[in-house]
Amino acid sequence: MPSLKASVGTTIFIVQNQKTKEDMKVATLKTPSETAIEMREMVMPNHTNNHGTVFGGTVMSWIDIAAAMVAARHCGRPVVTAHIDDIDFIAPIKMGYHVLIQASLNYVGKSSMIVGVKVTSENPYTGEVRTTTKAYLTFVALDDLGRPVSVPGLNPETEDEIRRFDNAKKRVQMKKDVRSTLKNRS
């Protein structure tokens, strides 16, 4: 690699048109639909509590797995769950019901990604479908040494994607405001 000697004795390295694989990945914008996933489960006896409905922790696990797949698909790197923002259990899911977990990327920061997840259940005998759970999770992309690494940008295209992006942006700002307020009270 060529270098120049500066007048104060500092060595300056000149890099011309050399982008790393990671730099090229980050420069590429992706749409939420490119990385969205759907996952299906069937509620079995080992998933249920004494009420005959699925354990909340089991649903949380399915949500975390689906969201992690979305985040990893977006950045092409290993990811870790950094935060579960909201998780709302709206309705119970009974044993034998089919479960659909839909996850899509809503927002990206420098190394973090916010994934929205919606869980619906279906009674396989009647066809009745209802939303049972919603959640927002934040993931951080990691380099080969386990340190945070930059992620590609997000290009929301549809009205739904743009709405989710704007809402996630507001959620990020509210979280910063709350942290700042709590920090100032300490």
Image (spheres, rainbow, N blue to C red):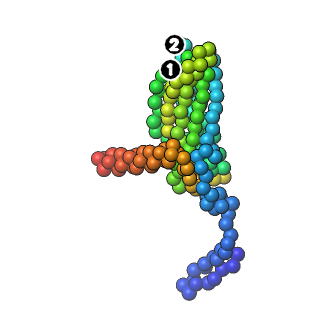
Tell which of 16 and 183 is nearer to you.
16
Q: Amino acid at mark 1?
A: Pro
Percent coordinates x, y for residue 146 in the rendering: 61, 50
Q: Which residue is mark 2?
A: 51
Residues at discs 2 and 1 in contact (Cβ within 8 Å): yes
Which residue appears farthest toward the right when viewing the image? 1
Task: State the residue at coordinates (65%, 74%).
Answer: 15
Badge 2 element: loop
Badge 1 element: loop
Circle 2 Cα neighbour tier, 10 Å, few/some/many (<14 / 14–19 / ≥20) = few
Percent coordinates x, y for residue 24 in the rendering: 65, 61
Task: State the residue at coordinates (50%, 35%).
Answer: 135
Q: Is residue 178 left or right of residue 167?
A: left
Q: Amino acid at mark 2?
A: His
Q: Which residue is mark 1?
A: 92
Seen in the picture, residue 121 relative to 87 is either above or below; the reply is above
Residue 98 visible, this orientation: yes
What is the number of the mark on residue 62?
Answer: none
Percent coordinates x, y for residue 5 in the rendering: 61, 84
Query: How far is disc 2 from disc 1 in space, using C-alphas?
Result: 10 Å
Tell which of 163 and 96 is nearer to you.
163
Seen in the picture, residue 112 relative to 129 is either above or below; the reply is below
Seen in the picture, residue 155 relative to 13 is either above or below; the reply is above
